[in-house]
Every structure is written in structure tokens, then in C-alpha cells.
Image (cartoon, rainbow, N blue to C red):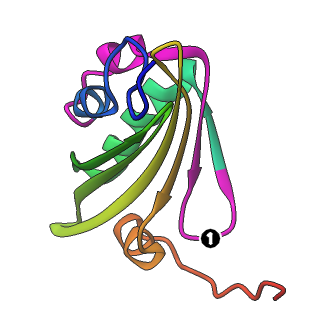
Amino acid sequence: MAQGKVQSGPSGHELFDAFAAGALDRFLAGCCDDLVLTVRGSGSLTTLVAKPEIASWYRSMRELAGTFRSEVGLVLSEDRTQVVLLRHSLVRGSVEYQYETVNRCTFRDGALAAWFSHPVRADDYARAWGLHRRTERLPA
């Protein structure tokens, strides 16, 4: 396998273009059966979403938002790991919100095996979803 290339299968850009378009069957076809999405929101808690739950998680996100759109902003590849920048916009109560997520993706045998999603700016994420962000003090 050449350095900087993912083994056969869809690229991160193709997969996340499908995800952003709501083509979840096409997205999930490019994922390993044991995929777990780890989502970090605006606080220290994470949400774990197993592959069989991703479609319902995505639908619930769209329902909460009213109008929800995503687009792939950037994909960086190195061996079996890719970093995907996703831009999201949603409308809640006739107000449009935007935020970005950095998504670290690991591929195995050409399929998405691990997906970690973090907001670029936690405040933008919290505002978009109507969350009250608490200030957390962490040990140095």
C-alpha cells in the first residue's frame, strides 16, 4: 500500500459526501460492522453511537434541528487515518446556526473502522444545539 493512500474502498471524502447528503445506506456500506462513532459535544461528556444506531442518531439530529445541512470542507489523508472537516448549518426557531467538526477517521481494509467527532469551537456547537455550556475546571 502506498504511503498516504487508503486501501481499496471509498475515500473519506466520498463517504462523508454521502453522509452529508443523507445517503446513509451508501455511507454505512463503507463502514466496518464494528464501527463506533464517538461524539464529543460542548462539554466533557461523549456520546457513543454503534454502526446500527447511526441512521437513527442522524435522523434524530435532523428532527431536532428542523433544517440541518452538512458539507465536507476538507479531507487530509495519511496511511489508514483521515481527518475530515465537516461544516454544519441548522435552523432552530428561524435562527440559523453554524458550526464545524473535526472528524478523525481510521480505516481498516478500506472501510471506516473508527470515527471520532469533535466541534472546532465548543461554544458554536453549544449555541447551535441550544445547550448551556458550563465552565469546567480541569486539573493542570
Any magenta on residue 44? yes
Residue 138, above or below 81: below
SS at badge 1:
loop
Residue 85, above or below 27: below
Give residue 84's position: percent from left, percent from top.
Answer: 36, 46
Give residue 49's position: percent from left, percent from top.
Answer: 60, 34
Comparing 62 with 11, the one in front is 11
Q: Which residue is mark 1?
A: 43
Q: In what quadrant of the picture does the C terminus appear?
A: bottom right
Q: Residue at x 38, y 28 (%)?
A: 5
Comparing 137 with 96, the one in front is 137
Q: Residue at x 33, y 42 (%)?
A: 63
Any magenta on residue 107? no
Residue stretch rendered in magenta on the structure: 20-46
Q: How many marks?
A: 1
User: Which quadrant of the view contains residue 77?
Assistant: top left
Give residue 10's position: percent from left, percent from top.
Answer: 32, 18
